Image (tube, helix red, strand yellow):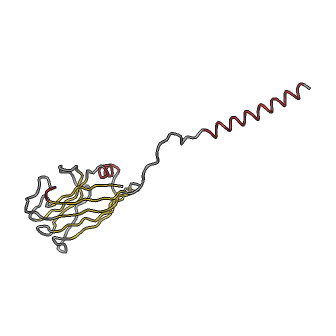
Amino acid sequence: MKTGKSLTKKILAGIVSAFLLAFVVVSCNKDDNNTPAPNNNPYTLAGNASGAQMVPAADSSVKGTGTFSGSFNPVNNVLIYTANWAGLTGTPIAGGIYSGASGTNGAAVDTSWAFDSTFTATGNITDTVTITADQATQLVAGNWYYLFKTEANPNGEIRGQISATR
């Protein structure tokens, strides 16, 4: 008879052990590290351009202006934008987006914008570009700008820093 009670105790101990093990396993959650999920919301892009932002600043007679608007999706690194200009000294001959902090000159980020005889001293250009992870970091940090060049100002007539906000 001792073996029957001993067997019952062993079975009962096994059941209790199984419940305790199940409790421990269920209680452990690898997501308990309090790391927030990444923010994958898109950024809104904006920037106003003037001759005063050129490096060095354009002649004070330059009265042209520009605006930049768009969005940047950090999930697929796609940038969609429109750059506008008005009141330039002539038709833009070149322009584009560059890397560089405010007050510094930088390198072109993508191919330059091409302008032909259909453009005038006022207009816009729209594009969609996929950028690299390093470029995305620069953009989000505010280290991108855009500019427009004219015959009268071949190094740039107006420039505007691009801001990225959520």
Residue 131 versus residue 3: which sits nearer the camera?
A: 3
* In the image, farthest residue toward the right: 1
Residue 113 versus residue 91: which sits nearer the camera?
A: 91
* In the image, farthest residue toward the top: 2
**Which residue is pictured at 10% across the width and 65% down the height?**
151
Q: Position of residue 121 (x, y in %)?
A: 15, 70
* In the image, farthest residue toward the bottom: 118
Residue 100 versus residue 63: which sits nearer the camera?
A: 63
Displayed quadrant of residue 59: bottom left
Displayed quadrant of residue 69: bottom left
Q: Is residue 110 above or below residue 7?
A: below
**Which residue is pictured at 25% across the width and 67% down the height?**
125
Name the quadrant of the N terminus.
top right
**Which residue is pictured at 64% across the width and 36% down the height?**
24
Name the quadrant of the C terminus.
bottom left
Q: Position of residue 42 (x, y in %)?
A: 38, 57
Residue 117 versus residue 73: which sits nearer the camera?
A: 73
**Which residue is pictured at 18% across the width and 62% down the height?**
148
